[in-house]
């Protein structure tokens, strides 16, 4: 038995490699991939050669990037974190043959898994398995953003994912997958008002098809529009919280300008080229703003015992049950045969092809 694996051998070079499948061992189970979602941010940074792990050493003990050998050198053999597979063999009572679940093992047609070392999230029968690509990792990324907003208000006393947005005015910068899912979660759990901002008309059209309100950042100054519209008290106008989901400096600068005094930006973006154009001497300083990174590697300090990855996946399943039909119709822009992955990834990296969410199908 052989598996096909997507491998990035160098900048702009993606190959499909066949490997012998690992034999079933006691306590393990094997899945065959049904769907594998493409993350246009993290994955393409390896194809483009812009990911910092390719060029320097990540010192996990110090939490610092340092000069030295690349922590993840080419070839990159494990690309992607949005997989759905069906269990075809099992030597563990923990996972039954025939179960369909979400995992994070990269773009490959099969995987031998250890249920003690790896997450396997069984999908409910009433959920379209294609939407399961969001359950293990991408959905929790977005839910973790909402969790950071809740912790910003309540510290460790967060009872509900809606504690940071319920009844509040919320803006989302960007209209990619992370931004749109985050906006849908905020709406589902009770944001009083919401606005999405992205300069790309097709993406704003998708947001509107999902039922979200939008503004074009390159039209009238959106900071003036929202601070005029969203009044609290005299001299206190703007968004209570902004979710920044686009990894470009202008987006973070805009997010800061949208906030009311002492408001908070929850940043979910990956700035591959840094953010040199962000001006911290203006609104950030004079309005006493806060900036919190909601990177998926950790939940807010003190919440790990009650808000683990499993709970964030459960919140994702609830979201997909509510909005699954429109997400499948409007957010998933293409389903591509697995064998076309190398061409797809290089076309996306070189901007020869524009997609919102591509899913590889085996």
Image (cartoon, grey):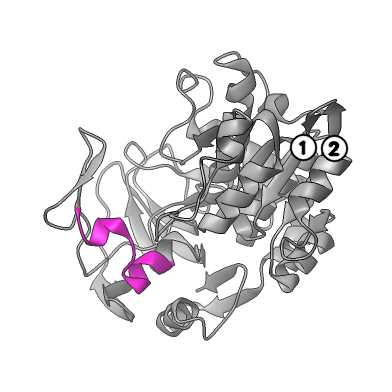
* Dominant secondary structure, magenta: helix
| Relative side of 276 to 24, left or right | right
Neighbor class of circle 1 (other Cα within 10 Å; few <14, some 14-19, many 20+) is: many
Q: Is residue 107 visible?
A: no
Q: Which residue is identified by label 1?
A: 238
Q: Is residue 257 left or right of residue 274?
A: right
How far from the left and from the top, in percent, is residue 111?
A: 35, 59
Work out whether residue 264 or residue 277 is closer to the camera in this orientation and state it: 277
* Badge 1 element: loop
Q: CA distance from mark 2 to mark 1?
A: 5 Å
Q: Which residues are magenta?
A: 44-56
Residue beneath label 2, please?
230
Q: Name the residue rendered at 76%, 65% in the picture.
A: 204
Q: Position of residue 116 (x, y in %)?
A: 33, 36
Quarter holding residue 156 = top right
State how many labels appear.
2
Q: Label 2 neighbourhood size at 10 Å, few (<14), some (14-19), many (20+)? A: some
Q: Residue at x 69, y 29 (%)?
A: 261
Residue at x 47%, y 83% (from the top left corner) = 347
Of pointers 2 and 1, the one earlier in the residue sequence: 2
**Disc 2, SS:** loop
Q: Give the x, y percent position of residue 317.
A: 66, 43
> Given contact means CB atoms under 8 Å apart, are the residues at marks 2 and 1 in contact?
yes
């Amino acid at each position: 038995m052989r598996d096909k694996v997507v491998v990035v051998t160098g900048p702009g070079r993606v190959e499909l490699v066949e490997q012998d499948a690992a034999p079933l061992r006691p306590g393990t189970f094997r899945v065959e991939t049904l769907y594998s979602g493409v993350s246009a941010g993290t994955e393409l940074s390896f194809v483009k050669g812009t990911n910092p792990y390719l060029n320097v050493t990540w010192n996990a003990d110090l939490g610092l990037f340092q000069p030295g050998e690349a922590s993840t050198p080419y070839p990159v053999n494990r690309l992607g974190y949005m997989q759905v597979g069906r269990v075809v063999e099992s030597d563990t009572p923990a996972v039954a043959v025939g179960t369909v679940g979400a995992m994070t093992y990269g773009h490959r047609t099969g995987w031998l898994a250890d249920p003690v070392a790896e997450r396997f999230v069984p999908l409910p029968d009433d959920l379209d398995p294609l939407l399961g690509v969001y359950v293990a990792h991408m959905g929790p990324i977005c839910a973790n953003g909402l969790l950071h907003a809740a912790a910003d208000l309540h510290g460790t006393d967060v009872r509900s994912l809606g504690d940071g947005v319920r009844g509040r005015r919320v803006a989302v910068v960007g209209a990619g997958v992370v931004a749109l899912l985050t906006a849908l979660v905020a709406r589902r759990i009770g944001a009083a008002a919401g606005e999405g901002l992205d300069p790309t008309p097709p993406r704003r059209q998708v947001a509107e098809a999902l039922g979200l309100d939008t503004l074009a950042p390159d039209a009238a100054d959106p900071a003036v529009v929202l601070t005029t519209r969203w009044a609290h008290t005299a001299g206190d106008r703007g968004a209570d919280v902004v979710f920044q989901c686009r990894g470009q400096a202008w987006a973070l600068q805009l997010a800061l300008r949208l906030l009311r005094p002492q408001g908070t930006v929850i940043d979910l973006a990956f700035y591959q080229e840094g953010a040199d154009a962000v001006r911290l001497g203006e609104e950030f300083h004079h309005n006493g703003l806060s900036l919190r990174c909601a990177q998926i590697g950790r939940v807010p300090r003190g919440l790990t015992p009650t808000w683990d990855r499993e709970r964030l996946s459960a919140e994702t399943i609830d979201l997909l049950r509510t909005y699954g039909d429109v997400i499948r119709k409007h957010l998933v822009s293409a389903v591509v045969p697995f064998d076309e992955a190398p061409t797809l990834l290089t076309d996306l990296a070189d901007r020869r092809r524009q997609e919102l969410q591509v899913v590889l199908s085996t």
